[in-house]
Image (tube, rainbow, N blue to C red):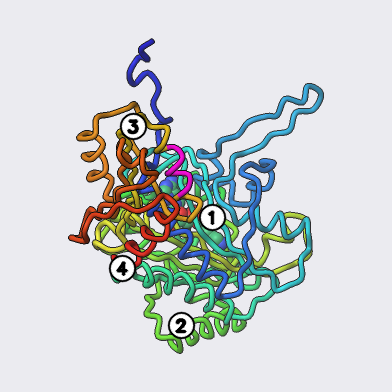
């Protein structure tokens, strides 16, 4: 039976990640996990879909909610529930916090796929992976600093040197209304210059207009009033403490007074990391901020929170651009060559794997020559050769593939010991 080639492809905006890129992705997540746990975060694993209401607070005027959510109803005939594949994890984590009420401060890290129906392009996918943290239960500016420092340290650990940290404060309920009023008045008095879409956005959330990427809006946005000029004493001193903490840790930053981010739950500190080697459309390798009202909006007690999410694919593109964090080698230690039919390779491979040695072998009864070629291609340090002579004498021939160590034939019972010795010498 022949299968029609390329009838099915991975859905638009999704990717198959094959080895060794998949090993690189896993290594990135593992590095993050170690660093997050070192900073006192424990992992949360939550469902990939939630009731759609969980995500409503991301903002009716945001692209994420208005255009990009993958929604579906379950199969309950009487009263079907509407769900959404998670477009991000902050709302899910806060939903879990409200549901379980862990002791605060509660510090959770996560990793996994997110889903947004975006227009796919390089670095922008419909299914993409994020790593991130959320810390709930304190509004101490030191938590903001620790969260930002974790992201900055992580990028540095990967070897990235061309990230810029942009920070802003979006104020809170005490000072944001006055700012929104000033912003609305400003845009309304320049309405004819504003793009049609932004005029609609203005009606729903004037702050979102600052997030417009449309050329027509840029000049107006550049001249718009900025939140930092409207901060109350309280939010102003919170922002000052965050900046002082970053300075104390030697983390460079730029104040970006028009940074509003693409989601509506933010209060006070907001930040983004932009990689300068990447194109502007996808140079945001991560971002986050405070969301002090989100727990209450999701039916919980008033609980401040701060966190970030970093885009795994974007970071790997940045690593490519900067030439750092290559894919790890995926070669095996040992390749078994069996000229006696394959049965003996089956047993020997299993024996070696039980000694924690990584092993591959040939299949389909290939010729000795073709098996030796495969052994070479595999990158294995050692080939174990089984021929008729070895079968008769219950021995195995050991050949080092990358060094000039002499080829030896040892009794089957000693093969593991000898291989381990050779592998150790070659490290
Ligand atoms: P976000 O800015 O929407 O924030 O996403 C965070 C990061 O995910 C982005 O900076 C980018 O690296 C990556 N990303 C977003 N969309 C895509 C896409 N379509 N394809 C590839 N990568 C993408 C959040 O998600 C918030 N939950 C962050 C946060 C956590 N705020 C507080 N806590």
Q: CA distance from mark 2 to mark 4?
A: 46 Å
User: Does the CB distance between marks 4 and 3 fall below 8 Å?
Assistant: no
Q: Position of residue 262 (x, y in %)?
A: 49, 54
The residue labelled by disc 1 is 111
User: Does the CB distance between marks 1 and 4 fall below 8 Å?
Assistant: no
Mark 1 vs mark 4: which is more N-terminal?
1
Q: Quadrant of residue 166?
A: bottom left
Q: Which mark is residue 340?
A: 3
Q: Which mark is residue 246?
A: 2
Q: CA distance from mark 2 to mark 3?
A: 66 Å
Mark 1 is surrounded, within 10 Å at the Cα level, by few (under 14), some (14 to 19) or many (20 or more) other residues, namely many
Instruction: Name the residue located 37 percent from the left edge and 75 percent from the top edge.
Output: 254
Instruction: Name the residue located 57 percent from the left edge and 56 percent from the top edge.
Output: 264
Asked if residue 222 can be seen in this view, the reply is: yes
Mark 3 vs mark 1: which is more N-terminal?
1
Q: Position of residue 4 (x, y in %)?
A: 35, 14
Q: Position of residue 376 (x, y in %)?
A: 22, 45
Q: Helix, strand or loop at disc 4?
A: helix
Instruction: Name the residue located 39 percent from the left edge and 38 percent from the top edge.
Output: 345
User: Does the CB distance between marks 3 and 1 fall below 8 Å?
Assistant: no
């Amino acid at each position: 039976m022949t299968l029609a080639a390329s009838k099915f492809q991975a859905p638009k905006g999704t990717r198959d990640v094959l080895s060794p890129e998949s090993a690189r992705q896993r290594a990135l997540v593992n590095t993050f996990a170690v660093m997050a746990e070192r900073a006192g975060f424990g992992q949360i694993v939550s469902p990939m879909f939630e009731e759609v209401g969980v995500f409503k607070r991301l903002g009716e005027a945001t692209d994420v909610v208005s255009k990009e959510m993958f929604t579906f109803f379950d199969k309950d005939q009487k009263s079907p529930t509407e769900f959404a594949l998670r477009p991000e994890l902050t709302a899910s984590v806060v939903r879990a916090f409200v549901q379980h009420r862990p002791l605060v401060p509660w510090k959770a890290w996560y990793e996994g796929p997110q889903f947004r129906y975006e227009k796919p392009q390089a670095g922008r996918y419909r299914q993409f992976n994020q790593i991130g943290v959320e810390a709930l239960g304190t509004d101490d500016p030191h938590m903001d600093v620790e969260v930002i420092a974790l992201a900055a340290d992580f990028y540095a650990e990967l070897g990235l040197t061309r990230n810029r940290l942009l920070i802003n404060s979006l104020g809170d309920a005490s000072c944001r209304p006055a700012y929104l009023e000033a912003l609305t008045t400003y845009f309304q008095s320049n309405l004819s210059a504003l793009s049609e879409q932004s005029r609609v956005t203005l009606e729903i959330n004037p702050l979102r207009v600052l997030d417009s990427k449309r050329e027509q809006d840029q000049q107006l946005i550049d001249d718009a009033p900025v939140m930092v000029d409207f901060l109350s004493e309280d939010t102003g001193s919170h922002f000052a403490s965050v900046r002082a903490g970053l300075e104390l840790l030697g983390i460079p930053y730029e104040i970006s007074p028009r940074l509003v981010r693409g989601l509506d739950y933010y209060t006070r500190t907001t930040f983004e990391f932009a990689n300068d080697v990447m194109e502007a459309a996808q140079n945001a390798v991560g971002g986050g901020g405070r969301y002090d009202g989100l727990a209450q909006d999701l039916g919980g007690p008033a609980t401040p929170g701060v966190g970030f999410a970093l885009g795994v694919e974007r970071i790997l593109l940045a690593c490519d651009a900067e030439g750092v964090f290559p894919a790890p080698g995926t070669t095996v230690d040992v390749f078994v060559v069996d000229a006696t039919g394959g049965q003996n390779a089956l047993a020997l491979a299993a024996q070696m794997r039980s000694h924690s040695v990584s092993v591959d072998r040939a299949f389909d009864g290939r010729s000795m020559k073709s098996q030796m070629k495969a052994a070479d291609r595999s990158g294995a340090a050692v080939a174990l050769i089984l021929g008729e002579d070895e079968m008769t004498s219950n021995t195995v021939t050991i050949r080092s593939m990358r060094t000039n160590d002499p080829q030896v034939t040892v009794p089957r019972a000693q093969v593991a010991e000898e291989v381990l010795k050779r592998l150790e010498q070659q490290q």
